[in-house]
Amino acid sequence: MPLTERELRETIVEIGKLVYQKGWVASNDGNISYRLDQARVLCTPTGISKGMMTPDDLIICDMHGNKIEGKRERTSEILMHLTIYSMRADVRSVVHCHPPYATGFAVAGRPLNVAILPEVIVGLGCIPLAEYGLPGTQALTDTLTPYIPKYDALLMANHGAVCYGDDLWKAFFKMETLEHTAKISLVSELLGGAKALPRDEVNKLFDARTRYGISSKSTAAPGCPVVAEDLGQSGKITLTREELIAIVEEAVKARQG
């Protein structure tokens, strides 16, 4: 049964508290929206902490970004939300945050596109990086448009991340997956680097979506996700005869003290 507008407001407030408690936003950062119908979007306002909102703080905008209901003012990034809705008829909710691990990758200019986690491959395909655009302007939206039709989670260079889905919780959980992936990716790099899955295993995961009841716009594409073969990883260590002798000699010296 569809949620009432009041229930949707309460859900957005609950998600706002979660993203604030998880440290995905600071101060008044971030924004959350839900498409009520073809003409109206319920969204968080500007100038308020996402962890301290009430249902009555939320506002309603039309599909041009004009406020049509509410006491507060609209977010400056409403254009990003509206662009996603206009390009994806299947999307009903958008969540934008600055989760620190994922944003760290975005600031470093690195996408989360290596095939290392089956759950991410099945659910999201991969997480590309859009180029920098000034927040709250058409420039930001223009950098996202090539990716919006094909992916449900995006990094934005020097800015943050945006995720979207067919309900509020799905958009939230995609953001949670994105940040969790960034943490694991960082830890794997500290331990010497992630080992990507080979192409045939990645293809099996894409094929398994139907079995898991998962629908996603993303498909396997060159470089997204990046597979083991793209990185020259075979899963085996190859040494020349000279390298092997050097390793053995070093080990013998170390043992002899």
Image (tube, rainbow, N blue to C red):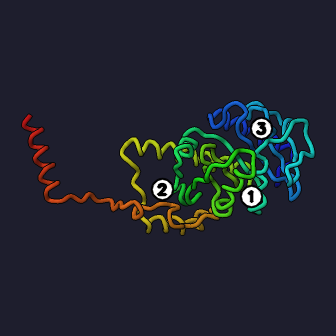
Q: Disc 1 versus disc 3: distance between alpha carbons?
A: 19 Å
**Left or right, 7 with reference to 31:** right
Label 3: which secondary element:
helix
| Residue 6 at x, y percent in the picture | 86, 43
Q: Label 1: which residue?
A: 91
Residue at image coords 73%, 49%: 168
Label 1: which secondary element:
loop
Q: Label 3: which residue?
A: 13
**Left or right, 121 with reference to 147:** left
Question: In this view of the protein, which residue sits in the foreground, 250 or 178?
Answer: 250
Residue at image coords 58%, 67%: 219
- Give the mark nearest the N terminus, 2 or 3: 3
Mark sitting on residue 110: none
Q: Label 2: which residue?
A: 114
Q: How many marks?
A: 3
Q: Nearer the viewer, mark 2 or mark 3?
A: 2
Q: Nearer the viewer, mark 1 or mark 3?
A: 1
Q: Amino acid at mark 3?
A: Val
**Left or right, 7 with reference to 229:** right
Q: Amino acid at mark 2?
A: Val
Q: Amino acid at mark 1?
A: Val
